[in-house]
Image (cartoon, rainbow, N blue to C red):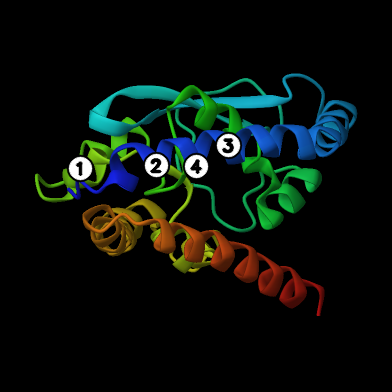
Amino acid sequence: MTASFYARAGKRSFDVCCALLGVVLLAPVFLFIALLVLTTSGWPIIFRQERVGRYGKAFFICKFRTMANVPSSGDESLLTASGDARVTRLGRWLRRTKCDELPQIWNVLRGDMSLVGPRPEVPYFTGKFTPRQRAVLEVRPGITGPAATHYIAEEQLLASHPDKELFYVNELLPAKLEKDLRYAEHVSFNTDLKLIANTFLRLLMKSRASES
């Protein structure tokens, strides 16, 4: 992967500075959403799930909980499609606006994640990566990234296929990894800024489309 100064040191400094600023500016939003989750569906407020990070190291990703707080049967799908009955009413809004991802600022501060990078997968799916595809694990996973931005309506796309896991493993995941591999090979400050701006733009467009 690239050995530019930004990739080696600048990107991490950019992540930490932005994450610290985000914690300060978004503190009221964090508190508001936490109270909404607590009052509408109880404890816990934060959902934690094992994901695979840089160099294959496992970590626990943090999100605001968007699903009903019911005992796990152990055979729930790892994929969430639009219309999933497990998602609460508040959860649907959080997922549509991506506000459920905000606690990942903590993962950025810890060094588990970056602001921009390939979205981290669960071990089950990384276990299906080809040797070439595993090159995406050479960079920190991101809150947003090229594949996440392009497939921002992933849940709707999954909902249109009867066998969601088969479609995800055979078609959607490889397509996402191709975009993430190209990013991992050419990490740059300009690319990160464009992807962050593009994420906000696409979220705004998606929000307006859902209201119309």
Q: Are marks 3 and 4 in contact (CB under 8 Å)?
A: yes
Rounded to the nearest angstrom, the CA distance separating label 4 from label 1 is 32 Å
Q: Are marks 4 and 2 in contact (CB under 8 Å)?
A: yes
**Is 33 placed above or below 164 here?**
above
**Residue type indicated by callout 3:** Cys
Residue 81 at x, y = what percent? Answer: 55, 55
Rounded to the nearest angstrom, the CA distance separating label 4 from label 2 is 6 Å
Residue linked to disc 4: 14
**Could you tell which of marks 4 and 1 lies nearer the N-terminus?**
4
Rounded to the nearest angstrom, the CA distance separating label 3 from label 1 is 35 Å
- The mark found on residue 17 in the picture is 3
Residue 22 at x, y = what percent? Answer: 69, 39
**Residue type indicated by callout 2:** Gly
Q: Residue furthest bottom?
A: 212
Residue 196 at x, y = what percent? Answer: 54, 59
Secondary structure category for the residue under label 4: helix
Residue linked to disc 2: 10
Instruction: Tell me which corner region of the image, top left, top right, bottom left or bottom right, holds residue 44.
Output: top right
- The mark found on residue 128 in the picture is 1
Res 67 visible: no
Q: Nearer the viewer, residue 50 or 32?
A: 32
**Residue type indicated by callout 4:** Phe
Q: Nearer the viewer, residue 116 or 123?
A: 116
Disc 4 versus disc 1: nearer the observer:
4
